[in-house]
Amino acid sequence: MSRLLPLTARISPDDLEFLSKIDVEGARSTGDKVRHIIGEARQRREGQADYNSAFRMLKDMLESTSNNIRLSENKTGSHSELLDKLLGWLPDIMAYLISWEVNPNHKDGGGKGLEELEKGLAKKVFLLLESVLRMGVTSSSSCYNETIISENMEPLLQLCSIIETSRKNNLGGSKS
């Protein structure tokens, strides 16, 4: 670590209270906490350079929430496959978006970059949709509410039916 330099700052009482209450692993002083917060800010700014960095940063941001969910699940003996999938999917899709934006190849505003973005996002969205649909194969799913998937599946099934009918009509009509 490089040499530490002193920093003096005036902060509001609310900010000081926040600093005193924030739990930072390994921090023994307010200065340790401030250094940690600056490090996190630097990581957020520099972590946008590529997908892997952005993914790690976003996964770290969700770690506390994920851990609390796991602890609660352990306590209650329950599990939600839906939450598990979403907590895995969110950092992935966000990292994809963030890393696309900072990619110098996309700065020209060209349509090709936008098409690549759309194609990548569509792939990720449909993979999530497919995995959620697989949870609806049976009337009960591995979620806190066992029927939450089947209860919410009906509008999707109706849309799929309409799309399938429309495709059949368009394919049938174009052959004549």
Image (cartoon, rainbow, N blue to C red):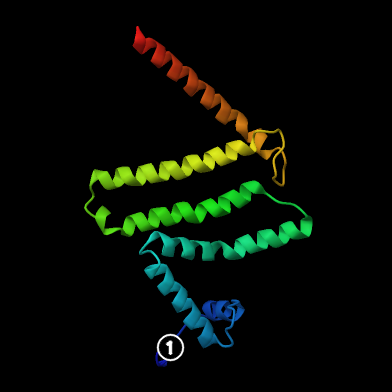
Question: Which is nearer the eye, 8 or 140?
Answer: 140
Q: Position of residue 56 (x, y in %)?
A: 48, 64
Q: Position of residue 16 (x, y in %)?
A: 54, 81
Based on the displayed image, in which of its 4 quarters is residue 138 positioned?
A: top right
Farthest top residue in view: 176
- 132 relative to 58 in the view: left or right: right
Farthest right residue in view: 76
Q: Which residue is mark 1?
A: 1
Q: Is residue 35 above or below residue 151?
A: below
Q: Position of residue 125 (x, y in %)?
A: 47, 42
Based on the displayed image, in which of its 4 quarters is residue 100 positioned?
A: bottom left
> Which quadrant, please, contains the C terminus?
top left
Amino acid residing under circle 1: Met
Q: Position of residue 41 (x, y in %)?
A: 43, 72
Based on the displayed image, in which of its 4 quarters is residue 73 positioned?
A: bottom right
Q: How many marks?
A: 1
Q: Is residue 83 above or below residue 1?
A: above
Element type where label 1 sits in the image = loop
Q: Is residue 27 above or below residue 108?
A: below
The residue shown at (39%, 57%) is: 98
The residue shown at (61%, 61%) is: 65
> Which quadrant, please, contains the N terminus?
bottom left
Sort mark 1 into few (<14), some (14-19) or many (20+) by Cα contacts within 10 Å: few
Q: Is residue 39 above or below residue 168?
A: below
- 86 relative to 10 in the view: left or right: right
The residue shown at (72%, 47%) is: 144
